Structure formats: C-alpha cells, structure tokens
Image: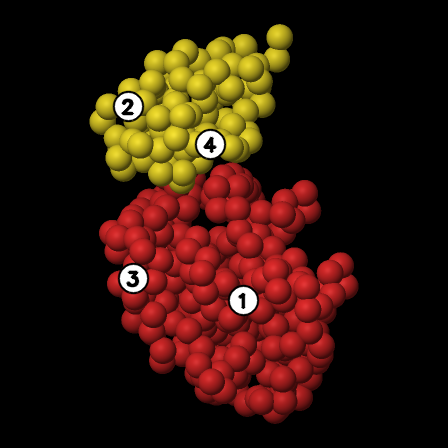
Amino acid sequence: MTSFAITGWGLSVPDRTITTAELANRFGVDEDWILGRCGIRERRAVGPGQSTATLAIESGRRALERAGLTGKDIAHLIVSTATPEQLSPATSAFVHQGLGIAGSAHDVNAECTGFVYALITAAGLIAMDPRPILIVGSDTHSLTTDPEDRDLGILVGDGSGALVLEPTTDSWLMAWNLGADGARTESLKIPAGGSRMPTSEETVRQGLHYAQIKGNEIYLHAVRHTVGSVRKTLEMAKLEPEDVDHVIPHQANIRIINSIIEHTGLPPDRLITNLDRYGNCASASIPIAMTEALDSGRIKKGDIVLLAGFGAGMTWGSVLLRWGGGAT
Amino acid sequence: MGVPTLQDVTNQLQAVSGVEQIDPDVPILTIDDLDSLDLMEWLYSFQEEYPEIPADESLFEEIDETVTLRSIYERVIATVPS
C-alpha cells in the first residue's frame, strides 16, 4: 500500500513576543508562579494584518520550498485549526489561494490534536491517491482569549507549522491511534459564534466569544488519554518506550508533558519541547517543534519519532514514524 | 477491594507534589508549593492505583480555604462502593 514520506517542513510565528514578565504584571502574580504553573517564558501573538491563514500560508510556503515543490504540485491541502480565518469558508480556502494550490482543500478541527488527525487523514488519502499533500497546523488562540483570563492567558501562543507528504512504498508510518470523548465538551470551549449559540449583542457582552477552560479537567483527562494512546501505539508497533528516539508532544503545559513522560515510561531525554519559547500554539505546536528539531539536525534517518497530542472535545492521538522509511 | 488510609493518601500527595510534609488538617489552599495541578496529578495516580473507587475531579469542586486533605479523604471514602 502507498504510504507517505515527509519531504518538506516549515514554521511561521509572529514577531510580537509576550513575555511571562509582562503577563505577571498584567495578572498581578509572580513570574515564578507562571513558570511553575506552565513552564512558558514567552509566547508569540499576531499583530495587525496577521491571521490564522497568513501564518499558514507562510509555513506552507516554507514547507513547499523545502520539498522543492510549488502549490501546483499539491493534490490535497489539509489545514488543522480551531481558530479559523472566519466561520465560512474554511481556512484552507484562503491558504489554497495564498499558495496557488492546484488540488483540493479542507479543514480539520480536532482542536490541539488537529495536526495528528490531519496527518492520519492524509495517510489515508495518499493511500487512495498517491500524490503530494500539504498539511498545515495553524492557530491564533491569542485572539480567542479574554485579555483578563489568567488561566488561558499565560498559556496561549500563535503560530503555524506545515509538512509536505509525498507518496512512497517505503512507509514511514509505523503505528497510530486516534480517540475522542464527546462527553468532555465543557472542559475547553468557545460557547458563542456557532449554530448552538449564534453571536448576538448579549453573547458579546457576556464574553461568550472567548475561550473558557477548566484547567484541572483538561490536565487529568489529557494525561489519561494521551498515556493510553501512546501505550496503544507502542503496542501496535511492538515497541517499548525506550525504543523511541524522539518524543514530540503537543506543547500544552510542561506539567502535563512531564506527567505523560513519567506515566508512559518514555525516556525524558528523548523529549523535544519548545514550549518555553512559543507557549501553547494548539494544533501548530507539534509541527513547529518538529520543524525546529529537523532544522537543528536532531532527527536523523532511521530514528523513531513519536507524536502525541490531545485537545478540546476531548480528542487525542499519537503517531509513530520511522524517519526516512523502513517502517514495515 | 483495597481502600487507602489517610496516611496512604497523604504519602501519595507528598510524592507527586514534592512537598516534603503535608499536614492533612491544614487547608490545602494554604500549603506552599502545592497547586491544583498537583491535586490532579495525585488524582490520576490514585485512579490508576484504585480503579474500583470512582473518585473523580468533582472531589475538588467548591474547594475553599476550609478544605483539608482530611476532608478530601472523607469525600474519597464516601465514593467507595459498599
């Protein structure tokens, strides 16, 4: 069966930096409290003229350049985002136009797990239609966060990361797992702006267009489901935690990441994290971390790379790759 | 079915939080270096160790400056199936 090779990667983050010191001042807490709570020193935020799509176009352009392709070569574009350019049409339509994509375009919204979902969706697509696919994770949660919300304000950052997948019979995909629990829709949500609660003067007055988080619930269930997903994926590949060379988790909060590492038994020295510099970039966090690791030469041919994410919904997923092929 | 003692629960919370000594009669919110994420980490470990006890995050709802580890423990015990 045709599988995929990853031939291009790229990231884009806004220049504007919001430091933890600034937020400590804004929220009236100690800088050390924020660092201890989430491990984030600074995060990026979009400015005028920037949006989910403009970041996605830039990361996508860099990934295409790296792969030596243009938009005309791309058969399918998948954009994972939970902070869309607008309610309709899909963000992928704007990215399609911006990159001159020749083929199809659609969005995936699995919140912060979106990129893992997009990757597995792309793996299925490329098996049926062996042509290049561009997947982009892009989010701008700084725009959906109440400026007075300390719990979310210390976490969120904006950014985008992209991968180009090309068909190969020498599979890179070793194993994967996706899951969801729709009973957890209250844990992290933006209540207004959709069909359930259309935007009105009242919803805006009440701030219901901003994200709301129950951080403790997210922590508990993110750890539980991500640990379970990683265990299933390792089992599917018949591997032990110590066989994994690199772990790239969703960069949500260092406390959650450390808990997942501890409970899965994955070696801590295999962890790739840039959380301290970018914050929680939602569905962009995994491809941004992956791009930095690749650009620094940390990931080498033959290495086993584990991606693991979780997000609102709740959703979760993990993917095991053998870099350079030879997965099966 | 094993049921933990208050000392078991105290030891678990000390282990996951790194707080050396936790007095179960001191209000939880006043304990230095212990925050809500530590409590969730403890709960996760507890649920893994005692899967038959249906304790969940509702243990920590309406937590205020009067709630102690002992009162949390009493909430845990109240969930134990008879």
The answer to whether residue A307 is visible is: yes
Q: Same subunit under labels 4 and 2?
A: yes
Disc 3 secondary structure class: helix
Q: Which residue is mark 1?
A: A144
Q: Which residue is mark 3?
A: A25
Label 3: chain?
A: A
Q: Same subunit under labels 3 and 1?
A: yes
Q: Please tell me which residue lies in front, B65 or A252.
A: B65
Q: Is residue A315 above or below residue A159?
A: above
Q: Which chain is red?
A: A
Give the left or right position of residue A179, taking residue A229 as reference.
right
Q: Same subunit under labels 3 and 2?
A: no
Give the left or right position of residue A256, taking residue A169 as reference.
left
Q: Same subunit under labels 1 and 4?
A: no
Label 3 and label 2: CA atoms lie apart by 31 Å
Q: In percent of the image, x 44 and y 53: which residue is there?
A: A151
Label 1 and label 4: CA atoms lie apart by 28 Å
The answer to whether residue A4 is visible is: no
